[in-house]
Amino acid sequence: MDWLALSPDEWVAVRLSIWVATWATVISLPFGILIALALARGNFPGKSLLNGLVHLPLILPPVVTGYLLLLTFGRRAPLGQFFEQYLGIVFSFRWTGAALAGGIMAFPLMVRAIRLSIEGVDARLEQAAGTLGASPVWVFLTVTLPLILPGIIAGMILSFAKAIGEFGATITFVSNIPGQTQTLPSAIYTFTQVPDGGPGAMRLTLVAIAVAMAALLASEFFARRVARRMAS
Amino acid sequence: MSLSVSIRHRLGDFELDTAFESQGRLTALFGPSGSGKTSVVNAIGGLIRPRGARIVADGRVLVDTDERLFLPAHRRRIGYVFQDARLLPHLTVSQNLRYGRFFTPKAERYADMATIVELLGIGHLMERKPGQLSGGEKQRVAIGRALVASPRLILMDEPLASLDQARRAEILPYLERLRDETRVPIVYVSHSVAEVARLATDIIVMAEGKVRAAGPAERVLHHLDVPSLEGQRADIVSVLRLAIAGHDQPAGLTRLRTEDGGEWIVPHFSGAAGDGVRLIVRARDVMIATKRPEGLSALNIVPCRIAGIEALDQGEMLATLDAEGQRLAARVTRHSADRLSLRPGMEVFAVVKAVSVEHG
């Protein structure tokens, strides 16, 4: 079973992937909740456009998304310059860029899960909370948020799993630098390009399968909890 | 507490054009479904924004469309008990009860939670989640939740409509205690004459978005046979205000007396002598006799004078009787009215079986 043990370099790739996916999920969460709210409850011009924009990364070839990121968040690109100048964040060829690419590719999944759970919330409960003196912000914090919490967690799990496996946009945007931007899938890709890479590719593949499966099961579990809460 | 409401609102084809005032402890909004009762309480509670309205509760202007004033629901401090309790499913009963109080300014928290829990008999449910409660229990908790928030007014929209007969009977006494023992005025929506007769101090009769009658309960209940309420006719009732005179335990009876010294006998129920009681008598349970009948099982034979008599429809008449200072409605066939030549001013006897009356 020795061949199953990950080499130090492989560990670096796995750790980097987890690090990148965690940041991608955490940073995109507030935006995910806001946009899910707007799509579930809002009624504004351009709603279909926003919906389309959010789902675009799901449909576009990932390499296109990566290229667009390069055009907007690259060092010379306007947004890239803005982030570097005012926030000190550089995306191109750094792990931050991998997180950005992963976050954007996973965003539709997160928004979808949260939006579904918001649509499942009985608006009459929120109305009742209002008659008890809760302002709209308090209603959101004490009624809506607790009721959609399982949906939020499910969305985060899906987003994490998607971000950890993101390949096309990531390799286009930030390349494949070991220890810097070489995430799990990039590492597998590298293994497949060299002789004797087989066992390494297989080990990392098993890791990827395990992570994906765990995420799906956890997401299922929380989806069931949403259903139970809504039913009572 | 005074409530002044004037609303003009349109919902699809339905036109609401309502104005009334009430000072009552429990004002019933009464009428058939689709008459606009719920829209009125929703406007008072701030759940809908009427096109044109002025609503003033206790001197506080809640809505005045002319002044472009609209107080949002969460700033009105008006409790709302919905037909479907709407308890927050992720909180326990205890947390649901406390929910509204959290948002009430400290200086305005007059409600004592322990008293309310005791009043509604929900002390044993505190740690449960709403999913583990029966329909009647949910509704009691919903009433408690509204009360604990120390509201200035409570709206109840058919709070018993989703419950079966047994559960209704379980909750009605709590509503009566609420009316009599707390100082919060209640606006109560219902299409059930029995509920309204038992609970209301004041009644607003609505039909097709308009107010058809308004005033103190005893007066309005006699005129419920307005043409728009035909479906309700079978339920014309009188409400008598009496006091307990004493109990006849061996016979299983309770004696009640009117202010004018008249006596009514009903099946035994508990209560101290001198306690006020409202007796609900259905007009179809009242017989009229021109001579004092003898050899009759009915226990209540009350001398009355006919105050008025009017046609209900082809075969039926409604006689309004002045029974020792109380108004009593009696339904008789036109045939009987003719045979006995009933006419206003005539001295007659009203005959009512003890088992046919309800008290509340």
Image (cartoon, grey):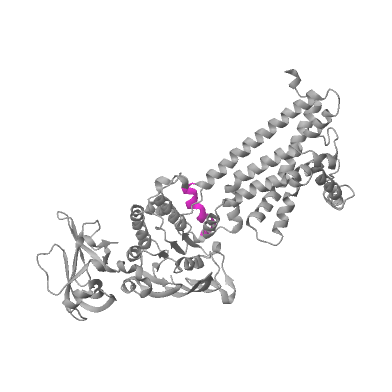
Q: Is residue B195 above or below residue A185?
A: below
- Residue B259: x, y in percent? 23, 71
Q: Residue at x 70, y 42 (%)?
A: A159
Q: Residue at x 19, y 60 (%)?
A: B246
Q: Give the mark count.
A: 0
The answer to whether one can see residue B90 in this image is no
Task: From the image, give the main secondary structure of the stretch colored magenta.
Answer: helix
Which residue ends up furthest to the left in the rendered image?
A: B295
- Residue A209: x, y in percent? 70, 31
Q: Is residue B78 left or right of residue B308?
A: right
Work out which quarter of the rendered image holds the C terminus of chain B and state it: bottom left
Magenta highlight on residue A191: no
Magenta highlight on residue B104: yes
- Residue B214: x, y in percent? 39, 74
Which of the 4 quarters of the picture holds residue A173?
A: top right
The residue nearer to you, when weighing B36 against A198, is: A198
Which of the 4 quarters of the picture holds residue B321?
A: bottom left
Start-end of magenta stretch = B90-106
Which residue ends up furthest to the right in the rendered image?
A: A76
The answer to whether one can see residue A69 in this image is yes
Q: Is residue B72 left or right of residue B207?
A: right
Q: Residue at x 60, y 58 (%)?
A: A136
The residue nearer to you, when weighing B166 against B124, is: B166
Work out which quarter of the rendered image holds the N terminus of chain B and state it: bottom left
Which residue ends up furthest to the front in the rendered image?
A: B314
The residue nearer to you, when weighing B160 against B235, is: B235
Q: Is residue A131 above or below residue A67?
A: below
Q: Is residue B157 above or below residue A78?
A: below
Q: Residue at x 82, y 43 (%)?
A: A63
- Residue B33: x, y in percent? 42, 65
